[in-house]
Image: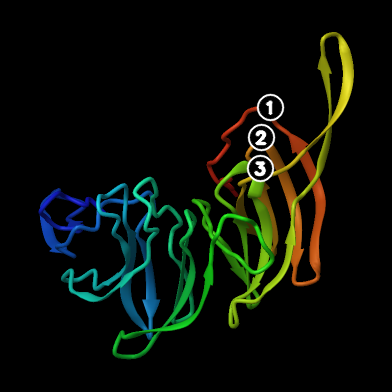
């Protein structure tokens, strides 16, 4: 997703020679923080790019691209109207559906793609950055789909971040939790107990459960179901803000 000025939004490159194979999406949708995601839709290979960086005027959205030739099936505009914003969540593919989300008063959208690769909006959720019960705007972490539900960290700022469970079919928010983590620290020679949170964390499914890294350095083993959240185990690896990289598992 190169987002070249006055040029292509996305390029395909031969991994052996480095030669440019194709260009796609010649518009003003700039490069985003989201990675292109390969998937099969109706049995056919596609690459989904959630474009849209800090462009003026603000622009961006989802592109469905045939990786063989760079042909764009459709462009779906979905980006905040604010200049100081980006699209950062990687597209989430669920069967023949694609889910995208952004904060900065944008929101979330679930698309259904037919056999002609035409998208239909199944549902949307607004994001007013107030962390209200029915709002949904994911800043940068990629959500996870499991058994018909989406699990994700909602919220743009530390103060409005929460872990949510969303019904993938209807968009209904099943529950919203702010994990509370008590830690003992030493300050000015005295031990104190403080309450912390995951803030804007990252999730990864492993063996049917969830690994989570919280923004302040907590690594947690979670059981997430439509019935709620359960912390199975956790360790505070380090006291460091802006721990934003997702966990990596090596078998």
Q: Secondary structure at mark 1?
A: loop
Q: Residue at x 24, y 73 (%)?
A: 66
Image location (x, y in percent) of residue 30: 25, 53
Image location (x, y in percent) of residue 207: 68, 61
Residue that carries the numbered disc 1 in the rendered image: 239
Residue ranking furthest to the top: 189
Image location (x, y in percent) of residue 65: 26, 71
Residue ranking furthest to the bottom: 115
Q: Nearer the viewer, residue 49 or 107?
A: 107
Residue that carries the numbered disc 3 in the rendered image: 214
Q: Nearer the viewer, residue 249 or 237?
A: 237
Picture colour scheme: rainbow
Q: Nearer the viewer, residue 146 or 84?
A: 84
Please indicate whether residue 118 sits to the left or right of residue 231 in the image: left
Residues marked 2 and 3 touching at CB (< 8 Å): yes
- Label 1 CA crowd tier, 10 Å (few <14, some 14–19, many 20+): few
Q: What is the CA distance from the residue labelled 2 to the residue labelled 3?
A: 6 Å
Q: What is the CA distance from the residue labelled 2 to the residue labelled 1?
A: 6 Å
């Amino acid at each position: 997703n190169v987002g070249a000025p006055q040029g292509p939004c996305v390029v395909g490159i031969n991994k052996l020679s480095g030669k440019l194979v194709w260009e796609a999406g010649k518009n003003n949708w700039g490069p985003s923080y989201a990675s292109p995601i390969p998937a099969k839709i109706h049995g056919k290979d596609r690459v989904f790019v959630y474009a849209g960086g800090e462009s003026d005027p603000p622009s961006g959205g989802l592109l469905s691209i045939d990786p063989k030739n760079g042909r764009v099936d459709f462009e779906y505009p979905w980006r905040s109207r604010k200049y100081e914003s980006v699209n950062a969540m990687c597209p989430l593919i669920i069967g023949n559906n694609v889910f995208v989300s952004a904060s900065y008063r944008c929101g979330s959208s679930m698309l259904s793609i037919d056999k002609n690769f035409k998208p239909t909006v199944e549902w949307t959720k607004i994001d007013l950055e107030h962390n209200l019960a029915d709002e949904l705007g994911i800043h940068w972490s990629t959500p996870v789909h499991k058994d018909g539900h989406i699990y994700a960290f909602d919220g743009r700022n530390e103060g409005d971040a929460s872990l949510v469970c969303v019904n993938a079919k209807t968009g209904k928010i099943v529950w919203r939790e702010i994990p509370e983590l008590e830690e003992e620290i030493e300050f000015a020679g005295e031990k104190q107990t403080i309450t912390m949170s995951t803030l804007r964390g990252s999730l990864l499914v492993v063996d049917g459960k969830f690994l989570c890294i919280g923004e302040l350095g907590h690594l947690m083993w979670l059981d997430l179901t439509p019935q709620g959240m359960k912390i199975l185990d956790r360790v505070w690896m380090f006291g460091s803000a802006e721990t934003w990289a997702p966990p990596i598992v090596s078998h």
